[in-house]
Image (spheres, coloured by chain):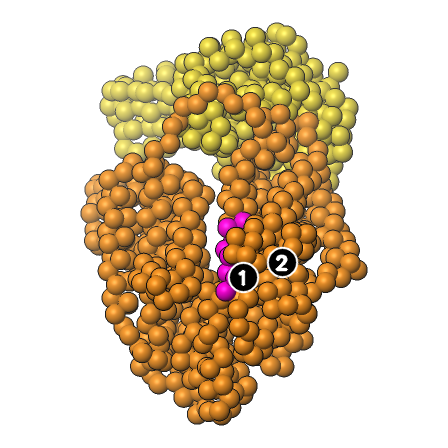
Amino acid sequence: MTASTSAPTPMSAHAPRYRTEVALARRAFKQVWISATLWALLFGVTIAASALNYTSTFPDRATRLKLAATTGRDRGMAMLLGPVSAIDTVGGYTVYKCFVFLTAIGAVWGLLIATRLLRGEEDAGRWQLVLAGGTRAGRATVATLTALFAGVGVVFVGTTAITLLAGRNPDVGFGAGPTLLYGLSLMIAPTVFVAVGALTSQLGRTRRVATGLGMAVFGITSMLRMIADSGESTKWLLWTTPFGWTERMRPFGANDPRPLLLALAVVAVVLIGATRLASTRDAGAGVVATSDVSRLRPFGLASPVRLAARLDASVLSTWCVGAIAAGFAFGVVANVASGVVSSSVSDTLRRFGVHGGSFVLRYFGIAFLLVATVVALLPVSEIAAAADDESTGRLVHVLAQPVRRTAMLGGRVALAAVAIVTTGLVTGVAAWLGAKTQGVDPGLGRMAGAGLNTVPTALVVLGIGVLVLAIAPRAATGTVYGVVIASLVIDLLTTLVSGTSWLDRVSLFHYMALAPSEHTDARTVVLTLTAAVLLCVLALTFFQRRDLDTA
Amino acid sequence: MNVVCTDRLTKQYGHTTALDALDLTIGEGEVFGYLGPNGAGKSTTIALLLGLIRSTSGTASIFGLDVWRDAPAIHRRVAYVPSESDLWPSLTGAEVLEFLGNVHGSVDRVYRDELVERFDLVLDKKIRALSHGNRQKVVLIGALASRPELLLLDEPTTGLDPLMEQVFRACVREARDRGQTVLLSTHVLSEVEAVCDRVAMLRAGRVIETGRLDALRGLAALHVVAQLHSPPPDVSRLAGVNNVVIDGTTIECDVAGSMEPLLRKLAAVGVRHMTTREPSLEELFIARYGELQPASTDER
């Protein structure tokens, strides 16, 4: 036996300062860099495709002036798809085309990564483990935020680099300065919503609540931007929303950097607040107090499916309310859209594949494509909850009881399906109501039908999600997001870039009629529903046979 | 009558063998201790018995029913307690008990109230506000209150304080007295000694010892550390003395059986100070089966 004569000095005595924070930041960056790189590619390619497409579609000054003369009057489309400014230039057109799509995706991505790496880590108990090391909550929050902003930096660098490359094309001719400013303007949304996510992660006690609060901010600020773009008298509202700040910068036009400073100031204030809250509150707790004591409420305790309904009701309702609000807003805007119809708008609608019916109906055809995206994302909450139940071990408590696997999962699928059908139907009615308040009546039955038209596609998404859940539960949530977002991106890209219509077949939305403008093809609906049912049956079969994740 | 019966039950994850040809029988009304270090395959066995995972080969039955095919029918007569109870954070303890009772279909509410009192559990607190031990109590009460024919307990006392461990042991003994069968997976020897009739020792997915508790006690050895006045004598040839380590005038060894021959030898050279302690389960394994080879199992 060898006796030790002198004990080694504890490692911590030699540890460099901020080693824990550096390690934490590195780990956080590892969790975001892949998605940041993918978004950078998507942003860059979307911008490049839009710019190149413009130069080929509108090759000379005359066609561009004609486009500007007609598009400028369509306030309804400006509310929907973003501001119309300097559209007679490649830059102005590109900014217009990409505005809503890129800012919305950037904002949601920023919010989700922030709540995942801050509140999500705390939810899982890993944050407490970190705080037991050589750091404090405030410093750990700053370290994580540094990594998150590094992720935003990756998106900025990638987007700007690809835009610069596209700008080298003589027909495009983007200058370095305006391109840089454009890249920065697109980073406002993800930066602000990383900060919003950091703040809501301090407020809410769970990741779900934190994300929900952040999504509420997203909804309100998006709505503010739409109202701001609805008329001159409301234009000042652009200063109250990050989407307005992006809009006001007008890259490739006015090139105004002032909103950027405002954005930075707001982000700094929000981050200081978030960090202070992180430093002062208890680990594991949220600033928004929730009672830990409650009397027994028997609702939802009779079976696993009823329990799922009880636990998921708030999230499903939020999705449903969001879809209804969107439907209503689109309905209200229909009044503006029913005004003078320009050739550019007709061209835009044609590119989306909307051909039939009046302009209002064609407008709703596009609007319901966006509603369909929201409805198709609705299964995410149910799939995520089911995957979470399994990864945390709660599912074992259920399946160790006399419960059949197929009944349990089938029940959850039915629950999601009911939520999808209800949301689709009610959103259609809400859109009709919105239009009706503005004196436009597209017909209740027709609009309810348009809402229901979004259901089969969403059910296919549900089927895909459940199938992945049945095979690889940890990949299920990401797959659902991926399928829906990829479908939307493909749908939008194929409208922007000539010669890519073949790609459209990959998008799930390709198989959805743009109702109420287009008539729903019964055969396609039946085939879509059959595919959804088959996917679900396949999922139940796989789930019945596989090992549970009991690790 | 055998309640649990496995025949060459094997579970592999890729190239990793978590459980290797397990032959096990547990009789009716028996409290069966299932011992083994972390990663030995205890939880894998229970997951197989519950039909949560499928065996790679071999068979297992409970009440004569196939554990995979007839899982729901078996679960009506079984209750399970895992070592870590990750429950629904927004539900209260009372709501979790209500839910588990409803889903299981059988619950003795009077006994459940009694258990709540004995385990000193506050029912109106939400799970997220409960400590690990209190969450464990919720699941334990839920399982015991269903009065199942078979209790599958996987390290059920994790997080419980010593007082509550005593309550748990009393509940297990009462269950046995009522004729219930218990499979108690644990690595706590004292728990096994307190409540079990028969034990199986598991290592790296294989049963290395099985039998009555007396057989286990036969394996027990005391770990002795003695500081002597002069260099120690040779004790390695003494009966029951193993793992002798000498450092100057200090001697360490494990002694199985009588201490008398060792004490005589040491007393002859003069003992300055001596301590003895019971070995840990792991030390017992090492003493009985030699150095543990790198485990071929994952933490399962």
Colour given to chain A in the rendered image? orange
Above-or-below relation of A159 to B35: below
Given residues A398 and B251, the one toward you in this image is A398
- At x 37%, y 41%, the residue is A204
Q: Amino acid at mark 1?
A: Ala
Indicate the chain on which mark 1 is placed: A
Q: CA distance from mark 2 to mark 1?
A: 9 Å
Above-or-below relation of A338 to B300: below
Measured as percent of width and height from the top left, residue A137 is found at 27, 44
> What predominant SS class does the magenta segment belong to?
helix
Q: Is residue A329 magenta?
A: yes
Q: Is residue B173 magenta?
A: no
Indicate the chain on which mark 2 is placed: A
Give the labeled residue for mark 2: A442
Q: Amino acid at mark 2?
A: Pro
Quick check: A64 left or right of A254? right
Query: Under tag 1, what secondary structure?
Result: helix
Given residues A542 and A132, the one toward you in this image is A542
Furthest toward the right, the residue is A523
Query: Under tag 2, what secondary structure?
Result: loop
Q: Are marks 2 and 1 in contact (CB under 8 Å)?
A: yes
Give the labeled residue for mark 1: A334
- Colour yellow maps to chain: B
Tell me if mark 1 has few (under 14), some (14-19) or many (20+) residues whose alpha carbon lies within 10 angstroms of its own.
Answer: many
- At x 70%, y 33%, the residue is A404
State whether residue A416 appears in this view. Answer: no
Q: Which mark is residue A385?
A: none
Image quadrant in which you'd find residue A279: top left
Q: Which residues are magenta?
A: A324-336
